[in-house]
């Protein structure tokens, strides 16, 4: 899996999950339960991970949604 976006913004995470689900792209939000350790302060960013064979499509959808600046750098592994 490759990291698509890293953010502390729960609204953005929800929006991106919606976009990915609508497109049929399987994803995983890593570090989602870290709020237990940090006391719900939102300090530790959550990472949206996408399978390597779908990363290019996922990156395109994020750009089309106007959130291209939020994308993690392309590792070129896809």
Image (spheres, rainbow, N blue to C red):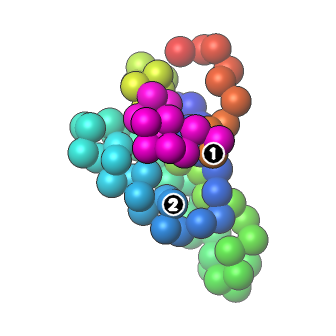
Residue drawn at 64 percent across, 69 percent down: 34
Side of 11 relative to 18 (left or right): right
Residue drawn at 51 percent across, 60 percent down: 12
Image quarter of residue 73:
top right
Q: Is residue 35 above or below residue 32?
A: below
Label 1: which secondary element: helix
Side of 71 relative to 66 (left or right): right
Whether the magenta-drawn stretch holds residue 63 is answered as: yes
Q: Residues within 10 Å of mark 2 (few under 14, many from 20)?
A: some
Q: Which mark is residue 53?
A: none
Q: Which mark is residue 12?
A: 2
Q: Which mark is residue 70?
A: 1
Whether the magenta-drawn stretch holds residue 15 is answered as: no
| Residue 39 in view (yes/no) | yes
Q: Evaluate if marks 2 and 1 touch, with contact meaning CB atoms under 8 Å apart.
A: yes
Image quarter of residue 18:
bottom left
Find residue 28 and report its horizontal and vertical position in percent.
45, 48
Q: Between disc 2 and disc 1, whose residue precedes?
A: 2
For the record, the magenta segment spans 59-69
Find residue 52 and report its horizontal and vertical position in percent.
48, 23
> Overall secondary structure of the magenta stretch?
helix
Task: Please name whichever residue, 38 or 67, is drawn nearer the observer in this view of the structure.
Answer: 67
Residue drawn at 64 percent across, 57 percent down: 7
Q: Is residue 23 above or below residue 12?
A: above
């Amino acid at each position: 899996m490759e990291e698509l976006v890293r953010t502390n913004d729960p609204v953005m995470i929800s929006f991106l999950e919606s976009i990915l689900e609508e497109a049929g792209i399987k994803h995983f939000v890593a570090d989602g339960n870290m709020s237990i350790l940090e006391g719900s302060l939102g300090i530790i960013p959550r990472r949206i991970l996408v399978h390597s064979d779908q990363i290019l499509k996922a990156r395109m959808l994020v750009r089309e949604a106007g959130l291209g600046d939020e994308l993690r750098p392309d590792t070129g592994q896809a």
